[in-house]
Structure formats: C-alpha cells, structure tokens
Amino acid sequence: MLTLSHILKALAPAAQYQIQQDFEIACGCVDSRCVTEKGLFVALKGENTDGHQFVDQAFANGAVLALIDHAIDSKFPVIDLSQDSFVLPKNTPFSLQTTDALTSLQTLAKYWRQQHNLVVIGITGSVGKSSTKELTASVLRSQMKTLRNPGNMNNEIGLPLTLISLTEEHKVAVLEMGFYVAGEIKLLCEIAQPQVGVVTNVGTVHAERAGSIEAIARGKAELVESLPAAPDGLVILNFDDPLVKDMAKQTQSRVFYYGLDPEADLWADEVESRGLDGIRCRMHYQDESLYVTAPLIGRHSVYTMLRAAAVALNLGMDWGSIFEAFKDNRVQLRIVTVQTASGALLIDDTYNASPDSTMAALNLLDDLKGRKVAVLGDMLELGRYEEAGHNKIGMRASEVADEIVLVGTRSLMTRDAAIENGFPAEMVHWFSDHRGATAYLLENLKSGDIALVKGSHSMHMEKIVSALEDGN
C-alpha cells in the first residue's frame, strides 16, 4: 500500500528529510466531502471553487495528508517540498506543498505504477469505453486481483487517483482513458504505461472540441502509439471500424482484431437480442466456435463481449472461465430500466448521447414488444456533424417508435428528419426543455408503453425519468 515514504520518494527525491512516523494512504480524492479514512486529499483549483479552501474539512473527514500548491489558512502543519531539507510532523494530518498539485498527483501515480509488476490495459474509443472496462474487469477479476477506474474517472485526475490505490496483490489494471483534446491520452499513457490497448470505435462524440472525426481518430490512436513493441505490447482493434482498423499502421505492438467479420482474429455471428434479458451469439476463435450468452442489453453489446473476451484470451484465460464470468457478470451499465407510476417501462439511458450510442439505444427499443415511445434530447458537442447526426437519429426513430417526444432546439432537426421519412407529424411532440416533455409524458404515457429516454447530460433528461417514476 502507498505510504508517506513512497510519496516523498516520488515528489522530493533529492531532498534530505526525516520521517518521524510513516503511515499508509488508503486512497486519493479531490472532493473533501468524499474523503475516507487514511485518505490523501489533493487540493485542485476548479472553475468554480478552489480545493485549497477545504483542506481542513478534508482532514475532519478522515484525510491524513493533503497535496497543495499555494499557501492556505490551516490549523495543521504545512511542509514545503521545495526545501532542501525538512522534518515531517510526528502526528497527522498535515499538508505537503508542491509547485503544482495536479502535476504532483500525476508524478506520484506514475512512480507508484512503476513499483508494481502487473499488466495495465488501456481502453479508449468514442462509445463503449465504460461498458468494456466494466465487463473486462469483471471477467479478469474472476481469475486475478484486478483494479479498475470507477465510474468516469478516466481523465488526467481520475486515472492517477485510481493508480495510487494499487497494491502488490493486483495482477492487472483495467483503465478507461477519455479523450477531449490532442495529447490527453498520450499523457494518460505516460502515467499508466499500459502494455495492452483496446480501441472500441471512432465517432463524433466531442467533435466540437476535437474539430473533426479525423482529429478524434488521431487522439484515440495515441493509445496504440504509446504501447511497447511486440512481444510486450498488444493492441486490440475493431476490425469493423475502418478508422480503428487502420490504427494497426501506427503501432509496433502485436495486433489482434475483433469484430463481426470472419477475417478478424476473434469474431461473432448469429447475434440474437433477447431484449432486456440479454444477448446470445456464436464466437469464433482459431478452430473453435462456441455459443455464449450474457446479461447485456442490446445487440451492440456483442462488441463489448468480444473486447472482454479478446483481452481475457490474450491474458491466458480459457473459454470456460470467460463464459462463466459472462453469465455471472452484472456490469454496471448506464442503461437501466425503470417502472413508472403509471405502469409504463422506461429505458433510462440518460447519462449522455451521441449519434452512435443513440442509434444503439433505438435498436434496443426496436427489439422490444409494446407501444414504443422515443424520448430524445439534443446531442451536444457534435460540431460540424450536428445536423447529420440529428437527421440520422430522426430517421431511425421514425422506423422504430410509435411516438416521438423531443427536447431542445437541436432536436428540431430530428423532428424534421422523422417527418420527412414518413413519420406522422401529429405523433411527434417537441418541447424546448425537459419540463414540457415531463408534463406531456405524465399525462400521456400509459401502462404497457415502453419509452426510451436519452439525451446529452446537460439536457437533464434524467429529471424526466425521476418525475415519471414518482408520478409527479
């Protein structure tokens, strides 16, 4: 487990210091309200507040140490790590002052990862990163001690916080790596030093910031470029996505393809959606063909299964262990089902939305039996792909749904595309925000209806689900 002496070796390697009492660090946190016993609090300055204002609150909540980068008003000692020599306090808590708290956290995480002999798996892509991380970690955990970054801790803060939780018992770490701007995944790879990389796909998520789908592909490719050369490095690529498939040209690692094409190393066919009861498919690998089922929702989840299986096979797991892990797995998916007060069934996929993920959700809706209502909010950050993305969703919704409820100004494009594709105009209802849509659905959603609710996070579509569940 990480200790004070480890932190000092990482952050003040040239200093002369005296430790009067060494102690363990259980975990790291940047929110003083979420600190646990034996925690490390990293004080960061955000858009709205500065964590340095809450150092003593973090200590009150159980933190034993804080990383800071400027003077603070605290009743506890502060040790300046820029000094040539210093004496550490005998009692906790106290703060260590560095030139930059975030950089220090990243330096510490990189140092701590280097102290451990384990396999690190980096996962990136536009859609499916989280479900792939969860399923992969769950499968590997059935055979070996596995670390994963919880929730969406996939950035320059969350990934280092995850790594400092490493212990010598861990044999593998499964790390989701997010992308917003060029160089971000390269930085994460410098910290985590993965030997295995998995790329899910390349889509238009965050195109507004990245600029183009080509720029997104270049950003995702930073993972494959950062892997060690074969035989130490392995990259697992989506054979069915041309932009991902071509990343094989950008790595010296061994390449392993997955997909629905028989030319892939691991491929699947006979994909059968069983609605909310999961999916079934036949997987092919080398000379074997095997049927497998998993409690994952939607036909698109076959790719999640392929990725997890590809990692597990390459780490030496046998098919029997992989399939048993699939059956027993309860991955924390973002899609959940909720029963409304009126008796309707809601498919709650409100975490976020892109054209690809919304298309997958609509395909799931298509697999279900009942009167279907597509409740769709604006998809944000699509940049130059905004009109095409909303048009594509409007056309697919018109093919799947019996009624369409739309939220936000951009969804007017969705409405127009649905109507142009022959959907009855009187069955499309548009609202400027979630409140109008909620009021309409409370009045009109009936027992037996199945409603998909999806939109970008800032559209607050989750408030629609909450209101319908409560009935008010």
Image (cartoon, rainbow, N blue to C red):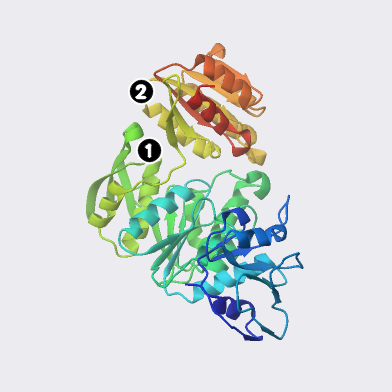
Instruction: Name the one closer to the observer, 216 or 333.
Output: 333
Tell which of 157 and 242 is nearer to you.
Answer: 157
Q: Is residue 16 above or below residue 193?
A: below
Of all residues, the one furthest to the bottom in this rendering is 16
Q: Position of residue 319 (x, y in %)?
A: 25, 56
Label 2, residues with CA under 10 Å away: few <14, some 14-19, many ≥20: few
Mark 1: amino acid: Arg
Q: Nearer the viewer, mark 2 or mark 1?
A: 2
Residue 67, picture quadrant: bottom right
Q: Which mark is residue 369?
A: 2
User: Up-down: is 264 above or below 77?
Assistant: above
Seen in the picture, residue 470 relative to 248 is either above or below; the reply is: above
Q: Residue furthest top?
A: 426
Q: Disc 2 and disc 1: Cα gap in Å?
A: 15 Å
- Which image quarter holds the C terminus? top right
SS for dot 1: loop
Q: Which residue is mark 1?
A: 299
